[in-house]
Image (tube, helix red, strand yellow):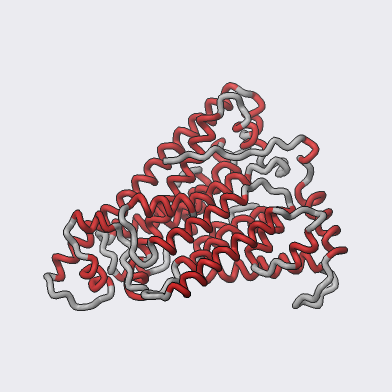
Amino acid sequence: MISRNLRISTFSNKYRHDFIHQNIVSRNNHLKSLLKFHYYSTSSSIDPYTEKVNKARFDCVEQISKTDPSTLMISKLYPEYLRDAFIAFKSLNIELSKISFGFQPGASNKSKEFNNLKFSFWLQQLEKCETLTMSNSSNIIRNLNEPCTILLADITLKNLNFDISMLKQMIHSHKHFYNNNSSSGFRNLDEICSFGEGTHSQMNYLMQSILLSPQLSGFSDAGIKLLELPNSNDLRNNLTDISAHLGQATAISSFLIGLKYFAEKKQTLMLPSDTLTKYRLPEEVCLRYLQGNEIEDNTNNIKELMKNVIFDVATLANDHLISARTKLKTVKDQIHQFSSNNDDIRKLIKNEKKGFPDCLFLPYISGLPTILYLERLEKYDFDMLHPNLMYKEWRLAFRTWNAERTRSF
């Protein structure tokens, strides 16, 4: 698996100022004088820029609440001034999923070309955010109308530490899925993991980077100090590997959750063909089974073979979770060792829960919905058509609280 080092800027100490008062206020005052256009609210107490960002935030939250409510719950764990970044990344992924998962069976080449143009549109939106500065902010923000890109522009102006190339990688991964897997499915589990690395893992990397922004004085200090130590390369790699494992596990479970939807609505089987071949299970038979149609062969036999296929796929997701937990334990030991040998580190993490800084742990909580789904899948013997798998996960609130408290998942 490819490991990515965390990108930590080497901003000088002059940038470590109060995040709320100096950065946001100066930005808003600058934009207030530049942006002059009409908004839905007639309130005179809110400047146009703030109102545009507020509306974008509302729209993103509404979208997430309808499509991925678990993400909305997890977002509450982030400090309010960092929550927009998490929401923006998730909202962008939803927008990209609408394109990559919105394919129609037998679509014409013209239709496919049109959808590829949509990916190009999102790349252009990100390029605008990439070139955003205080001096050109007026012209660029005026032309941004997508809620998630407005929030991305806002966090760019806050000088938060994130790499837009990771967002571009998400677009390329969705585009690759659309052009190569959307109608024919996956050849093997590695292709699913590759998609997870290019989407869900990227969002984890992005949040790791955001939370380690140097100007978040008092919040990111402990994490930055730890990762700036001379012998911290292994710690960096382990933190990044945890994000990678969780992202790939999330992708696998997401396609298992959507298996019935793809079979019914898209006539596509999102199971690796090599695993189907292993159990001599024809794709057409699987589709008919998931669609609830009659099968000429022994239905019970097909059901058991399907369970075997689902078990193999879910096992790989669980293997990624086991690897993530193993590396998390290693990270805890490394932090403990560093703090034992360094008085400054020991003072910084003294008030952190379990001696594990928030800025390093919070991105991992995004893996909880995957963990809970795999637990339920095992409970019902990997039967994808079991009605209890359709229920909303009521344990997420408690498990989220417990994970944040115990620094485990």
Residue drawn at the location 34% of the way across and 55% of the way down: 375
Quadrant placement of the N terminus = top left
User: Which of the 4 quarters of the picture holds residue 263?
Assistant: bottom left
Residue 326: image x %, image y %? 40, 37
User: Which of the 4 quarters of the picture holds residue 90?
Assistant: bottom right
Query: With respect to residue 297, does 346 lie above or below?
Result: above
Residue drawn at the location 60% of the way across and 60% of the way down: 123
Furthest-right residue in view? 33
Q: Is residue 81 visible?
A: no
Furthest-front residue in view? 109
Answer left or right for 328 relative to 224: left
Answer left or right for 189 relative to 63: left
Q: Is residue 45 visible?
A: yes
Task: Tell which of 50 and 278 is nearer to you.
Answer: 278
Answer left or right for 275 relative to 320: left
Residue 83: image x %, image y %? 63, 56
Residue 320: image x %, image y %? 38, 45
